[in-house]
Image (cartoon, rainbow, N blue to C red):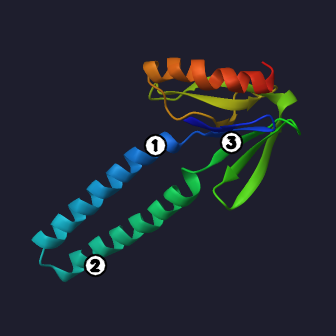
Amino acid sequence: MAIVKNTPKELILRPYIKGLKSYLQFLVLGIIALGIFYLISDNREWHLIAASLVGFWALNSLYFVVVYYPMEIIFDKTDKIIYRKHSFLFKMKLLPFSNATLLLTQDNFRSQYYSIVHKENRFKPLQKISYYLSEKEKITFDKEILGEVGKVLEL
């Protein structure tokens, strides 16, 4: 949830960087729990199941840490187009500035986040530009980041 770069040519956001810390904490706790299970259990089949779970977690973590969390939202001010860039892999065109607007979305668990939506179809968010926000974080996000994004999109 930070502006990575704000130049005359582009504005770059990393919306999921806040979730990386909690994800890594959960991953470490899971590995510790499996390690304790490994020490307590004498059954070879259970060790195989535990090793499979650790392998799955490792692959899942690799995806989240390398692709998902470092994802960037790029507001190209020269072309007036919004892009999504996944790590070092690829850059995908989302929407031109003229068709984009911002929407405060609330999910079923009453968690709020900001997303970019198409002006004609506000019911389907195209891209989240913030992680889930508490009330305090929402106020900070409104002041610091939403103002910059609003200037870029001319809202």
For the residue marked with disc 2, what is the amino acid?
Leu
* Residue 114 appears in view: yes
Mark sitting on residue 73: 3
Q: Is residue 97 above or below residue 82?
A: above
Q: Quadrant of the C terminus?
A: top right
In x, y percent, where is residue 141? Answer: 55, 24
Query: Which residue in the structure is indicated by mark 2?
Result: 48
For the residue marked with disc 1, what is the amino acid?
Gly
Q: Are marks 1 and 3 in contact (CB under 8 Å)?
A: no
Snapshot quadrant of residue 134 = top left
Q: Nearer the viewer, residue 45 or 35?
A: 35
- Which residue: 40% across, 49% down? 23
Snapshot quadrant of residue 14 = top right
Query: Which residue in the structure is indicated by mark 1?
Result: 19
3D distance between C-alphas at marks 3 and 2: 41 Å
- Which residue: 71% across, 47% down? 84
Of pointers 2 and 1, the one earlier in the residue sequence: 1
- Which residue: 44% across, 19% down? 136
Q: Quadrant of the N terminus?
A: top right
Instruction: Report helix, strand or loop for mark 2.
Output: helix
For the residue marked with disc 3, what is the amino acid?
Ile
3D distance between C-alphas at marks 1 and 3: 16 Å
Query: Left or right of 31: which side holds 40?
Result: left
Q: Nearer the viewer, residue 117 or 75?
A: 75
